[in-house]
Amino acid sequence: MSSEEFELIVIGGGPAGHKAAIQGAKAGKRVLLVDLQQAVGGECVHRGTIPSKTLRETALGLWGTSRLAPKLFESGITGGVKVESLMRNLDAVRDAHADFMSEQLSRNGIERWRGRARFSGEHEVTVRGPDRGERTATGERILIATGSRPRLPDNIPVDHEHILDSDSILSLIYLPSSLTVVGSGVIACEFATIFAALGVDVTIVDKYERPLAFMDPELIDCFLKSFESMGGTFLPNRTIEKVEWDGLTAVVTSLDTGEVIRSEKMFVAQGRIACVGDLNLEVAGVEVSNRGTVVVDEFCQSSAPHIYAAGDAIGPPALAAASMEQGRRAALHAFGLPVPEEAGTLPVGIYTIPEMASVGITEEQAIAEHGSAVVGRSKFEELARGQICGDTEGMLKLVADPSGTQLLGAHIVGQGATELIHIAQMAIQAKTSIDVFVDSIFNFPTMAEGFRVAAIKIVQARPAELRKVG
Amino acid sequence: MSLNFDALLAGPVGLTIQAHTQSNDLDLPVLSGSVTEILALCNGAECDARELGKKLERDQSLAGHVLHVSNSAAYAPNEPIVSLSQATARLGFSTICEIAIAVSVKGKVFDVPGFDSTLSALWTHAAVSGFYAKEVARTLRKNVEGAFLCGLLHGVGKPVALQLLVDAWSEADVDEHLDDEIAEAMMNQFGGTFGGVLLGKWDFAPWIQAAVEFCHDADSAGPFREQAMMTGLASHLASWALGNSDETAESLSEMKIVADLEIYEKDFESLLAIKDSVLETARAFQ
């Protein structure tokens, strides 16, 4: 079989692969992009981020309206509502995004092959299509961006009908009346709150004490309070002993505490595993960690110098935004082009209801690193916009250095958190003084005013010799 | 076949058929009142088990079938289901709905005198397609719940087409015997279209109508192309599993529809490997 030659072969067309391919093409290289699917975008566009956020937008709208105009929604959303009807514009959103990405690939002259790729030599990749046809390509440089898939625990029989994972949860036809969520990470909490906001009786079960343990504890307090106000239940410190579909009407979950939960459906979200098992990486001499991810350095270069990896294939943070940047940096480094300094801050956005966002370090980390920290908070109930929106549980927290002048971190829960966080990100990256927030004029009424409120509190809490109230 | 089907369509039988199809004057079977009520109840917001039980009780034939199917291997009850309320409470609304539709469709549609064995085979194929459609959907992480009905009903237009042919044959007073080959050609030609029309009349969701109507012509199914392809593949798998076609595992795996659905080798082999369990489960509906 003859082999076609490329300067860059990208395996996987999700956020990391897509950006790497474009970067390679912009550098004037001949690029091949291999993906399992004809449609571009990977799981992010077709099963993950885009579809779940589309459903969330509906849930958020209904939930917000029901809080502002409770009389209009006295009966709430009843069980049996078609999930599809709650995400009517999904196809349009998804197609628009995929078309845009596809058009970018075409415009940059990137060749695309559909199929499952595996290394058949150090520089050679064999691609077997769904039509069982095989083609071989040789690449000067190769980037692995094959993404991840849901991790399925051995003791839970996921059948994608009654017991679902993040690949199948949105294929539900009807909104269930009750849902048990296994896990309390990002995906688990996002879906738990989306379904709770839609009126589903949701129970989160996890072995940990608190959900989303990497987030600021104060945000999690607000999150839990809000989740419980929607009728949700969080059961911490529980181990699942047995899960079974009773064959008729319910998923029965037995816990180590003796508790038994019966729910119409179950959603299992216990992390994801990198899709690198079928790549035949041994042939290429690529090292894989004991967690099943490709081991890379700061430039996403693997143990085989001509092979790079990016996105979920290399493990955390496994965020679409970070994956795109990894792909871009990997392509630049692969061809000896200048690689910009790594962004000092990586914002985290969690699309729960209410949403949460974080950038920089937490109060605990600041104390550990600097000996102490000055913290300022703004509760959304103190803001006119918070009252108008009915978001009285939200909160913005700024963490400053011990002198109270340098912003080290920001943590927000509530409406607009994932957008607001970028203000803090810019301030941290530009090493802006806290006083800039105090001296700036923010639109009224906005949630962004929270930055000024929190900053004033930091200034007031400064050591006396540094205090200057704006 | 003594008569060529194309020639037949050009003759008096064909004219009668055309007249009926063009004027939409089809003798479409009506779902029994109780099934319609059950469908409405299950699709409604206020679905109540007692109400569902009452509606089942009013249709003794349907009630008997529900109990029969409830106790079959497909639903593997831990203990025998002896009453309708027990069946309703334990099987859940959607399953009761599926059973009610299956039982009603079998009795109302798959009944053309003189073609018992043809329709019996069609019904078996429908049931196997239903369960295979679930497995195809499961493989693709799509809509497992809805796939069953698409598979089960994908051939529902064929008996309608056959009935029309029988009526037209009789009306045209054709001397020759209406043989199986002509019957099959008629069902293949009009089955999909009539299936879509029938399900439209029965108020099934548009995506189910499209999946049924275009299961062998998915490119015409518009936004429901994927459901149509899944249903089409389930139909092919059912034919293969039942030995009704010349398809082999290899030829099936090379079908364009498999590539279009992006079902890769390992997953497809898994679908082939569950043949026996699918056939066993489908027996519940026979």
Image (cartoon, coloured by chain):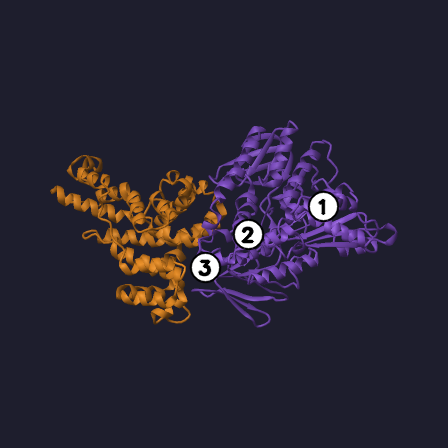
Name the amino acid type tagged 1. Ala
Q: In this view, does A144 lie to the left or right of A465?
A: left
Label drawn at residue A60: 2
Q: The orange chain is which one?
A: B
Farthest residue, direction right: A465
Residue B286 seen from this side: no
The answer to the question of whether label 3 and label 1 lie on touching residues, with beta carbons closer than 8 A, is no
| Chain identity of mark 2 | A
Residue B150 seen from this side: yes
For residue A180, above or below residue A401: below
| Distance from Cα at disc 2 to Cα at disc 3 | 17 Å
| Chain identity of mark 3 | A
| Distance from Cα at disc 2 to Cα at disc 1 | 24 Å
| Chain identity of mark 1 | A
Mark 1 highlights which residue?
A424
Compare residues A150 and B101 and report the one nearer the observer: B101
Q: Which chain is purple?
A: A
Name the amino acid type tagged 3. Gly
Query: Element under label 1?
Result: helix
Do the residues marked 2 and 3 share a common chain?
yes
The answer to the question of whether label 2 and label 3 lie on touching residues, with beta carbons closer than 8 A, is no
